[in-house]
């Protein structure tokens, strides 16, 4: 298991690689937070276990890992791809990087707001918020595992 920030930094580095090839655009904090949620859900559904221990909280604009949010919220549209991020990305094991790459390729094609809207239609966020009525609930990982297995992995 990793610190959630290391997984986030993997996505930042991956996005910078895509931008360098001329295909990508800047990665916002909102999109990064949704990619973390989808990465955790896919990892669980593939019986790979959790990528990180941090709770995923149901906020108004979807699932959030608070520690990652607070690390980057000072400048949410300019996430630094620095030496620290590159070092962190290299610490991700190949089998986990393969899942992150899959998530980036599938979910990274959507806009931040598109991902936000997707999460609001999914059982894990809906259950944690009682259909959007109560915010700040912890998104249950068992619910994520079952939902992602049924809706993303088995499809």
Image (cartoon, rainbow, N blue to C red):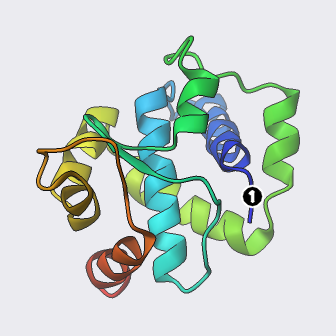
How far across and down, in percent of the image, does residue 101 sit? 59, 60
How far across and down, in percent of the image, does residue 153 sit? 38, 81
**What residue is at 27 percent from the left and 57 percent from the top?**
128
Quadrant in which the N terminus is drawn: bottom right
Q: Quadrant location of residue 21?
A: top right
Q: Quadrant location of residue 30?
A: top left
The residue labelled by disc 1 is 2
**What residue is at 27 percent from the left and 35 percent from the top?**
61
How far across and down, in percent of the image, does residue 81 sit? 73, 27
Give left or right: position of 32 versus 85.
left
Q: Quadrant location of residue 127?
A: bottom left
Quadrant in which the C terminus is drawn: bottom left
How far across and down, in percent of the image, does residue 98 sit? 65, 69
Give left or right: position of 12 versus 47.
right
In the image, residue 75 sits, relative to residue 84, either above or below, namely above
In the image, residue 18 sits, relative to residue 83, either above or below, namely below
**What residue is at 53 percent from the left and 19 percent from the top?**
73
In the image, residue 123 sits, relative to residue 15, either above or below, namely below
Q: Nearer the viewer, residue 72 or 35?
A: 72
Residue at the top extreme of this rendering? 74
């Amino acid at each position: 298991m990793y610190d959630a920030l290391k997984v986030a930094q993997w996505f930042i580095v991956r996005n910078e690689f895509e931008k360098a090839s001329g295909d990508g655009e800047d990665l916002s904090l909102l999109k990064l937070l949704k990619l973390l949620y989808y990465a955790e859900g896919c990892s669980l559904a593939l019986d790979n276990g959790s990528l990180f221990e941090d709770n995923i909280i149901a906020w108004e604009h979807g699932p959030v890992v608070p520690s990652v949010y607070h690390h980057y919220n000072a400048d949410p549209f300019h996430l630094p791809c620095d030496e620290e991020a590159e070092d962190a990305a290299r610490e991700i094991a190949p089998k986990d990087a393969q899942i992150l790459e899959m998530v980036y390729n599938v979910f990274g094609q959507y806009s931040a707001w598109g991902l936000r809207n997707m999460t609001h239609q999914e059982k894990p966020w809906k259950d944690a918020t009682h259909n959007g009525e109560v915010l700040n609930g912890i998104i249950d990982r068992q619910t994520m595992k079952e939902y992602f297995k049924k809706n993303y992995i088995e499809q």
